[in-house]
Amino acid sequence: MLNDTPTTSTPPTAAALPTARGPLSSAVLSALVQSPSDAGSVVAPVTDADPYGDDLHLALYLCYELHYRGLPGVDDAWEWNPDLLRLRAEMESAFLADVRAHVTVGGSAADEMDLLSTEHVDGSGPSFHLRDTGTAEQMREYLAHRSLYHLKEADPHAWTIPRLQGQAKASYVAVEFDEFGGGRGSRMHQNLFRDLLAAAGLDATYLGYLDRVGAPTLAPVNLMSMFGLHRSLRGAAVGHLAATEITSSPGSQRLVKALQRLEFPAECVAFYAEHVEADAVHEQVMRHDVVGDLIAREPELEADVVFGMRAIDHVENVLADHLMDAWSNGRESLRPAS
């Protein structure tokens, strides 16, 4: 069962670092608690690591978090430490190779977006399950999993802005502007999700559930961080955001119905209701003004755009399978509390 942790209106970052899950995360955590000037080389074996394992993805998530809000008790100078960046690059290579091995190549971006926009009435997955028969506890678990992204929603995609040009850049920024509340702090989607967690009786602390989630939850966030932080993957980053906006509205509508059926507070419904309307508009902007303009300017990036769309589909399917396997077998989908 999830622990009902009291929250405040401005929750801090988690007070403690997570527990290591293997040699990679142990090496990263052991280094981060030291001063960068005092620590020795950050070395750990990546070759034999599971590219979709808890150990690699926790270690990678920690490395990426240094570029966001930082980690509790960790010196900010670690962000650009050469040894840590070298280890991160090795883990990224292993993860990226694994994703590419599970994603088909070929096809056009337009066809891929058409496929993504086709809604299957009799579909399966967590949002369908929660809408129809899911329990309140399963919904709370789902929200805890999603907190690892939604409390930093739009931040990973923002890395891509300086890598774009022209109309693609202007329209991409317009979508991000909406995600960040249109200039109103209280309407930032990150803050709306924080309000959702608090209203649901969950821990609204940033990184509050980091120790409770595994690779299926961490990998989707790591994927968008990796895409955003590498200029060579800018096409994939655009494809990722396009796929997100195209699929968000119908999925959010199912979650609105689920939350209403389960009688969750209005703040919970409001978060997903916001995405039903806003992301339906964003789909058209991404389709024509961002993806269309980017490919017109840099046609060599079309394959990367398609890859980004298929990559997010792959990692989201892994998470969906994890959730549905746990719930169909009467198990909690979160890791045990430490």
Image (tube, rainbow, N blue to C red):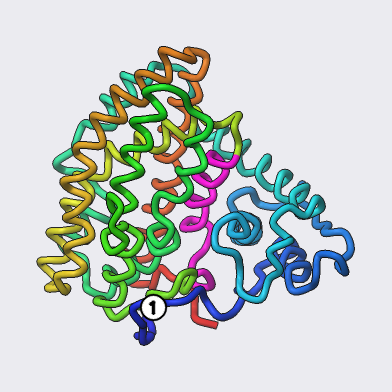
- In depth, the one of 53 and 43 nearer the eye is 43
- In depth, the one of 127 and 151 nearer the eye is 151
- Residue found at the very far front of the displayed protein: 183
- In depth, the one of 338 and 148 nearer the eye is 148
Vertical side of 296 occupied by 117: above or below? below
The quadrant holding residue 73 is bottom right
Vertical side of 44 occupied by 163: above or below? above
Q: Residues within 10 Å of mark 1 (few under 14, many from 20)?
A: many
Residue depicted at 52% across the width and 63% down the height: 214
Magenta run includes residue 90:
no
Q: Position of residue 310 (x, y in %)?
A: 43, 33
The quadrant holding residue 71 is bottom right
Residue depicted at 24% across the width and 54% down the height: 127
Magenta run includes residue 220:
yes
Res. 244 in view: yes
Q: Main secondary structure of the magenta part?
A: helix
The quadrant holding residue 293 is top left
Residue depicted at 68% across the width and 40% down the height: 93
Identify the amino acid type marked 1: Asp
Which residue position holds label 1? 203
Query: Is disc 1 placed on a helix, strand or loop?
Result: loop
Q: Position of residue 8 (x, y in %)?
A: 36, 82
Residue depicted at 50% across the width and 37% down the height: 160
Vertical side of 306 occupied by 263: above or below? below
Magenta segment boundaries in residue numbering: 210-229
In which quadrant will I find the N terminus?
bottom left
Q: Position of residue 150 (x, y in %)?
A: 38, 58
